[in-house]
Image (spheres, grey):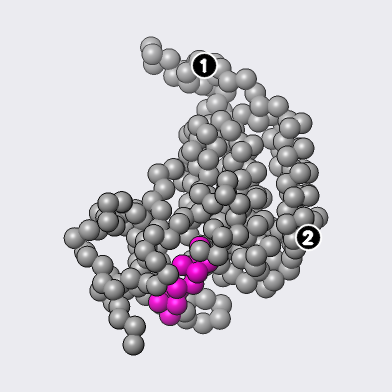
Amino acid sequence: IESKQELNPENIGNRLGKGKYANVYEYKWDEETIALKEVFQDVSSRKGPLDKEKVIRDEIDILIALREALPDELKSIIPEVKTGENPLFLGNNPSFGMTLFKEETLRSMINKKTIKNPRKAIIDLLKTILIAHVNGFAHGDLSRNNVLINPETGQIRIIDWGFVGDLNERLEGKLGDKTKVPERIRNIIENSDIENKEQLIESIENILNSNDVNSIEDVNNIIGEIESKLKQVPIEARSEQPIISESGRISVRGAVVMGLIAASAFTPFLVFP
């Protein structure tokens, strides 16, 4: 009988997030601070309740498999499992530790910060999700809270792979609207200085919805098409004039930005398997 390894509650730091079934904390692991995910109750799904320990085991297995499948330059986009292949326990609750990311959620920066390297963010997001699909994984909740981004560099992270659905059941081989990939790309583009935003978004959605994703060759073809579209669309020259001047008056640029913010609205659509 496998013994359960207990975690030390004294090593728990700040709570980073709380969901319907899980908490995420900072946790001191050896000499490193990691993110600790604890599932505190069984998870509801279309196929019935899922045992909470199985949920943790599945997420550990998925993260390990995905990092093996991704090329080296993309491995850092998803968390690395830090605490081994088996669950640890906070009391009776199965848990595991992973990389603690410091980037902001896409939700937190919408209409607040400009993403300065949107091309990198878009391509890295697409490559990661497409390679996951080729390997049989579909992220079940690609919400704006589960895409992290550094607005200065365009570095993204994708978290919360615990509700990965069956690829064929969810997508039928294509990157349709159910993936929420087009919505996250729209968020990135709308929060950047890329020109001709709507035209670019429509072009990318057409590419995603008209291509099969069954092999790495398919991935390369899709990425090639989208990279070509991105290169054709310039990024506006950014003015250094602040939105609000030191005198407290709103600048012309600030008035334009605030007008765009007021006119923008996003409705998140979360997918749950």
Q: Please, what is the three-letter code of the amino acid marked with disc 2?
A: Asp
Q: Residue at x 65, y 23 (%)?
A: 236
Q: Residue at x 47, y 81 (%)?
A: 49
Residue 92 placement: quadrant: bottom left
Q: Is residue 45 left or right of residue 247?
A: right
Residue 70 at x, y percent in the picture: 60, 55
| Picture disc at residue 171 | none
State the quadrant of the N terminus: bottom left
Q: Is residue 186 visible?
A: no
Compare residues 68 and 133 and report the one nearer the observer.
68
Residue 259 at x, y percent in the picture: 56, 28
116 over 155 or under it: above or below: above
Q: Please, what is the three-letter code of the amino acid marked with disc 1?
A: Glu
Q: Is residue 197 left or right of residue 117?
A: right
Residue 65 at x, y percent in the picture: 55, 65
Question: Which residue position holds label 1?
Answer: 240
Q: Residue at x 56, y 77 (%)?
A: 46
268 over 5 or under it: above or below: above
The residue lying furthest to the bottom in this view is: 1
Question: Which residue position holds label 2?
Answer: 212
Give the extent of the magenta segment: 51-63
Whole-angstrom CA distance, mark 2 to mark 1, is 43 Å
- Secondary structure at badge 1 equals loop
Within-10-Å neighbours for mark 1: few <14, some 14–19, many 20+: few
State the quadrant of the C terminus: bottom right
Name the magenta segment's main secondary structure. helix
Residue 257 placement: quadrant: top right
The mark lying in front, picked from 2 and 1, is: 2
Magenta residue check for 10: no
